[in-house]
Image (tube, helix red, strand yellow):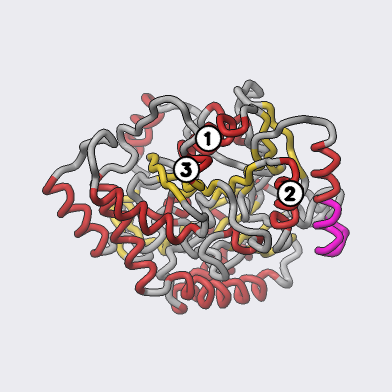
Amino acid sequence: MNRPLYERHRAVLPDWLALYYRRPIEITHGEGRHVWDAEGNQYLDFFGGILTTMTAHALPEVTKAVAEQAGRIIHSSTLYLNRPMVELAERIAQLSGIPDARVFFTTSGTEANDTALLLATAHRGSNQILAMRNSYHGRSFSAVGITGNHAWSPTSLSPLQTLYVHGGVRTRGPYAHLTDAQFVQACVADLEDLLGHTRNVAALIAEPVQGVGGFTSPPDGLYAAFREVLDRHGILWITDEVQTGWGRTGDHFWGWQAHGQNGPPDILTFAKGIGNGMSIGGVVARAEVMNSLDSNSISTFGGSPVTMAAGLANLSYLLEHDLQGNARRVGGLLMERLRAICAQLPMVREVRGRGLMAAIELVDQQSGRADPEAAAAVLEAAREGGLLIGKGGGHDTSVLRIAPPLTLTVAEAEEGAAILERALHTL
């Protein structure tokens, strides 16, 4: 560990700005699916800067696009025509599945969700929001106010009135014992009952797979069933695709498509992976909703020519190389391998996920309760073995989160699984 840098970090940055590992590492460079720290150690990266380096580290197509655009002009703001922004918006609007779509670019997923909440509440004339239990939507004041995860919600104050709905977690809670069909039916009944106690709700916001919550998800079709209820009440559906978008789940390009039987969402938010590390977020909404603001609004840094150039190059690479298909194929092999590794480990409660979005939930072997200490220990052991992973979870941080770049090879998947197997056995 670079102790002088660590001490400087502690002296000028907030105490709540967490660092991974007992001996925090400084990542200096990366290539493909690997990164190196300041001490020269090489790691296989199975977390991608929190699912953000989606394609690969130092992808030549993206770095070339960034350098060329930076050599022309770096910044102009949304007050001027911006060709890269228009071109990326055209492609995202078409890919979103939302009819007559409009796209607004931001600098992060938090800001994207904040904008979606602004649009929904303005369009509906209401500050009431439905959110899912165990959810996470960002760190702004409004996003914290709808986050259903105590560990990431530092205040109960909010500009919104938030009501929490069952359904985001399949294997915990009062409906866990039900079949998938019964689970969906029970969650829909809960939603109907909840709406009977309120009025004029603006929107439901939901992650198709809950990211920070530990890669939990409902049965396919739950949000389609919710959509029938929402439509009867005129309530908008916001899908938070900050972590699930761009083909990461393998089966679908967007997470909402697993719930698309009753049509696309009204609003879609995205960020993280589209920039492959560059700061891009955004909102897609049908024109009626997007154009409902009756005052001026701009974005100084959203839609920057440099980040838009990166997004265009990254999206082109992703589509041309069928990285969604790679996430499905290699992710499926990795999931099988992880389940085989964990089948005989009593501290593993569940292995879950889709595509290249996998999770291992750890519990105390005697009590069956969540075991954050075990998750921290495995995180450390994996790092010692040359593998970087993440962690998360709802009421705790007992879930190992595994989300490699979408170009992951079969050999790298096997290598990472072997390191993780050794790390789990250290418990």
Helix, strand or loop at mark 1: helix
Type of residue at label 2? Ala
Which residue is tagged 1? 119
- Where is 126 relative to 90, above or below? above
Type of residue at label 1? Leu
Type of residue at label 3? Gly
Q: Is residue 71 left or right of residue 94?
A: left
Residue 245 pos. (x, y %):
50, 57
Residue drawn 38% across the image and 67% down it: 318
Q: Which mark is residue 109?
A: 3
- Whether residue 177 appears in magenta in the rendering, the answer is yes
Q: Residues within 10 Å of mark 1 (few under 14, many from 20)?
A: many
Question: Along the polypeptide, which appears first: circle 1 or circle 2?
Answer: 1
Residue drawn 41% across the image and 59% down it: 54
Task: Using the image as rendered, state which of residue 338 and residue 72 is in the foreground.
Answer: 72
Q: Which mark is residue 370?
A: 2
Helix, strand or loop at mark 2: loop
Does residue 17 show up?
yes
Q: Are marks 2 and 3 in contact (CB under 8 Å)?
A: no
